[in-house]
């Protein structure tokens, strides 16, 4: 390989590295800007931008060939280096309203965000296409550089976000793109007036200096609301979240569900904001039990009126449940927290303030709760999980999976298995008798779990107590004794709680009464039946506890806006409606953008010289690839988010594996000679593997959920790699077949593949929410079965050249 090829390969490696970094950074940024479900849209827009860039290069024809391509690739890469940090900065300053009234400003803000997100990928798509098709390098080496750069971006994102804030990471990605531009200039062999080397040094230095400044640029309008910087004491960022800690102030104690309490109580608390959409309080404590008496007035503390002994807390946050356990006299507290930021806050930065980590009976574990509880041999008298979610999760419903994974039948069976005889699992959720709330679904999840454990009468094992807008569920694998029931009623009478469900009593709410009295899955299905809202128990295959809105119930939008009783003051269902409306709006914006930057240029260029039947078969082939591929990738991202515990790990692992092994498949496809056999056999193999995966995935994950994170990552890679290898065959085989029929049609097929993939990635999210993740696997299998039929017909048209 001569020096020019080395410069070209190095530039391509850096380009795809920067591109994957910014794609994953966008997914993280969108989790702060607006609803968590938009993080999946980053993949859609990356595909849209990449496809549109490729189409524009193909349509440019001779204007981007030879020396013109050599000059253009450096200029476009220079533009990419500027666009990455600039668009990221603009997005961090952009206010995306919550789409409550769907005014033009609200829709316009979302459309502007989509454009800003798409621009870097359009430029990157043009650069990659020029490097692979117009610069005359050795395709094998170039394709390998492309894959290695993309894989490196996937692998680096988590450690990068653990060291740098989001904006510093984006500036670093811009610096890498500038280095790529410098490589392309050296490849072209002529001087450039664009100072790409200087820009690279400036951006890389700016990234490091900005990160070290201690005052990084943050999102100005998280969830559309501005945070006053003067009130912020500290801010933390990592791959999981962005946490803002406000200055402590003395005020009445923070309660989730307060009962009757003395009005003169005061506590010095620092409020913490997570990703702009969740809140918790960190309270100053002197380590004396007498100074946390105030916690006993909260309904979330109820399990500690009934049990002491050993306690495990899922989701530490500011340590509130730990304080409740210590007040209740627990002789040991194991606090399990997936987010290292909260562990650092309690054990380092605010250790003296909170005094929790100094307690000899408290142990804080940084791990995912399901995995840890599966591995441990410990048993607990109380397992507590109070309001472990974010308001973003509550609103976005099906779109966020890191918290949803804790609210499934499979998860609760694990939790109950870690209790001592007579132990209690306590979980608290939002409740309102005047609004649609999560309590009915929480109760149905509880009943279904007990039924699967062989309990004949679940009602004997359950109590549900509410205070204001929070309800606490008490669940035991053993029937609750009469002493517990008596204590619950005494505490409720003393503190003004409401007992909604208790053993031996008929609940006043008809739905709650029907759910808790169910003694079979069929009876539970009848009790949870509702034309508009989904109260069925979530499972790992459909882990959408927070999404209550059923498909086809969007007409309640107008009812809610007109003050219908379903909405009351809004309730959590209004968040579901807004999130779902946002998804539908994104689908429309993505469709319009696809038509504008892919469809319109193709139509203007004219149809390729190709008979109508061959053109139709070719379009069908590449539409099936685009839709089928994303119908596999999106459910894998969703399903493994439950398994790994957080989307950002899943993004990096899944994209790394799929890019790498699909790339290997593409390289292997170049060596195929008898295309007819392979073009039919590979899609059939993909369809078969997809169906096998949909059936076998749950038992496999159940068997290995207890592995540490590294082991679970390895399982994900081993599971995903064989299918990804086969997926990589289809696109190049299709291009070879279409190229035999009409070389002019390749630009159209790039566009069709990209457009169908973009739309499929959004539709796949909706399908997962309403019918289950595995429904997408079935759709993907149908796509690849159709692909085998289309391949057979295309091969017949190609004739002997297909082999």
Image (spheres, rainbow, N blue to C red):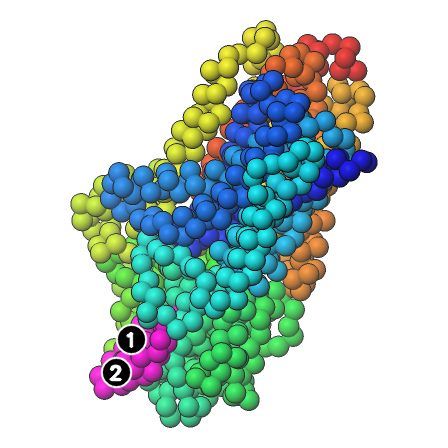
Q: Are marks 2 and 1 in contact (CB under 8 Å)?
A: yes
The residue lying at 69 percent from left, 53 percent from top is: 715
Q: Is residue 705 above or below residue 61?
A: below
Answer with left or right where residue 656 lies relative to residue 539: right
Q: Nearer the viewer, residue 165 or 603?
A: 165
Residue 216, percent from left and from top? 45, 62
Which residue carries the number 1 mark?
Answer: 258
Disc 2 crowd rating (10 Å Cα; few below 14, some 14-19, many 20+) is some
Q: Is residue 498 above or below residue 605?
A: below
Residue 489, percent from left and from top? 31, 79
The residue lying at 42 percent from left, 38 percent from top is: 115
Q: Where does the C terminus fall, quadrant-wise?
A: top right
User: Magenta segment, principal secondary structure?
Assistant: loop
Counting labels gives 2
Q: Nearer the viewer, residue 250 or 206?
A: 206
Answer with left or right where residue 318 lies relative to residue 734: left
Magenta residues (range) = 246-272
Q: Secondary structure at mark 1?
A: loop
Which residue carries the number 2 mark?
Answer: 261
């Amino acid at each position: 390989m001569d020096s020019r090829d080395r410069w070209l390969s190095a530039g391509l490696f850096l380009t795809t590295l920067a591109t994957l970094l910014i794609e994953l950074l966008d997914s993280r940024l969108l989790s702060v800007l607006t609803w968590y479900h938009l993080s999946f849209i980053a993949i859609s827009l990356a595909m849209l931008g990449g496809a549109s860039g490729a189409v524009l290069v193909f349509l440019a024809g001779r204007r981007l060939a030879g020396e013109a391509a050599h000059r253009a690739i450096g200029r476009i890469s220079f533009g990419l280096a500027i666009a990455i940090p600039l668009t990221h900065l603009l997005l961090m300053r952009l206010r995306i309203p919550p789409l409550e009234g769907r005014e033009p400003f609200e829709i316009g803000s979302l459309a502007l965000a989509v454009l800003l997100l798409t621009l870097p990928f359009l430029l990157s798509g043009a650069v990659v296409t020029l490097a692979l098709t117009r610069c005359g390098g050795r395709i094998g080496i170039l394709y390998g550089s492309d894959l290695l750069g993309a894989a490196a971006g996937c692998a680096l994102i988590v450690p990068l976000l653990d060291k740098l804030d989001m904006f510093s990471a984006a500036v670093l990605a811009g610096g890498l793109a500038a280095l790529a531009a410098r490589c392309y200039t050296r490849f072209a062999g002529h001087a450039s007036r664009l100072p790409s080397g200087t820009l690279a040094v400036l951006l890389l230095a700016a990234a490091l200096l900005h990160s070290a400044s201690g005052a990084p640029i943050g999102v100005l309008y998280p969830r559309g609301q501005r945070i006053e910087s003067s009130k912020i004491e500290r801010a933390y960022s990592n791959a999981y979240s962005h946490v803002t800690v406000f200055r402590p102030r003395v005020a009445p104690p923070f309660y989730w569900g307060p009962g009757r309490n003395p009005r003169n109580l005061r506590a010095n608390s620092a409020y913490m904001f997570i990703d702009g959409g969740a809140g918790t309080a960190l309270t100053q404590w002197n380590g004396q039990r007498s100074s946390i008496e105030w916690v006993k007035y909260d309904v979330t503390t109820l399990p500690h009126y009934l049990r002491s002994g050993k306690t495990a807390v899922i989701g530490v946050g500011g340590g509130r449940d730990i304080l409740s356990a210590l007040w209740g006299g627990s002789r040991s507290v194991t606090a399990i927290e997936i987010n290292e930021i909260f562990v650092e806050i309690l054990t380092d930065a605010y250790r003296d303030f909170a005094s929790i980590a100094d307690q000899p009976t408290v142990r804080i574990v940084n791990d995912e709760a399901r995995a840890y509880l599966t591995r441990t041999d410990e048993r607990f008298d109380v397992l507590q999980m109070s309001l472990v979610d974010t308001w973003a999760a509550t609103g976005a419903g099906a779109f966020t999976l890191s918290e949803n994974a804790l609210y499934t039948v499979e998860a609760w069976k694990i939790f109950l298995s870690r209790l001592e005889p007579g132990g209690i699992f306590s979980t608290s959720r939002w409740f309102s008798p005047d609004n649609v709330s999560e309590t009915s679904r929480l109760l149905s999840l509880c009943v279904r779990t007990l039924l699967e454990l062989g309990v004949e009468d679940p009602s004997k094992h359950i109590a549900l107590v509410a205070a204001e807008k929070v309800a606490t569920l008490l669940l035991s694998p053993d029937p609750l004794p009469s002493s517990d029931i008596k204590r619950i009623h005494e505490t409720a009478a003393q503190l003004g709680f409401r007992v909604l469900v208790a053993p031996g009593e008929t609940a006043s709410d008809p739905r709650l009464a029907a759910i808790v009295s169910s003694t079979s899955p069929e009876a539970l299905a009848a009790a949870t039946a509702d034309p508009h809202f989904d109260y069925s128990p979530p499972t790992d295959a459909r882990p959408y506890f927070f999404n209550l809105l059923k498909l086809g119930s969007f007409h309640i939008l107008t009812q809610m806006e007109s003050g219908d009783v379903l909405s009351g003051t809004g309730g959590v269902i209004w968040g579901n409606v807004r999130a779902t409306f946002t998804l539908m709006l994104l689908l429309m914006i993505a469709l319009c953008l696809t038509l504008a930057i892919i469809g319109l240029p193709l139509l203007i260029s004219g149809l390729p010289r190709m008979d109508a039947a061959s053109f139709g078969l070719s379009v069908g082939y590449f539409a099936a690839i685009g839709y089928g591929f994303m119908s596999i990738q999106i459910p894998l991202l969703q399903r493994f988010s439950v398994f790994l515990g957080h989307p950002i790990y899943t993004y990096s692992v899944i994209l790394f594996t799929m890019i790498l092994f699909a790339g290997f498949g593409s390289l292997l496809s170049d060596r195929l000679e008898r295309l007819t056999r392979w073009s039919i056999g590979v899609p059939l193999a993909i369809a078969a593997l997809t169906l096998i995966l949909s059936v076998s995935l749950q038992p496999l994950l159940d068997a290995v959920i207890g592995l540490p994170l590294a082991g679970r990552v390895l399982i994900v890679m081993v599971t995903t790699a064989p299918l990804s290898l086969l997926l990589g065959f289809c696109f190049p085989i299709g291009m070879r077949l279409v190229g035999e029929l009409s070389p002019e049609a390749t630009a159209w097929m790039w566009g069709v593949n990209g457009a169908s993939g973009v739309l499929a990635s959004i539709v796949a999210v909706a399908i997962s929410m309403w019918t289950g993740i595995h429904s997408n696997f079935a759709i993907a299998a149908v796509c690849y079965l159709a692909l085998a039929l289309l391949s057979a017909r295309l091969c017949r048209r190609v004739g002997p050249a297909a082999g």
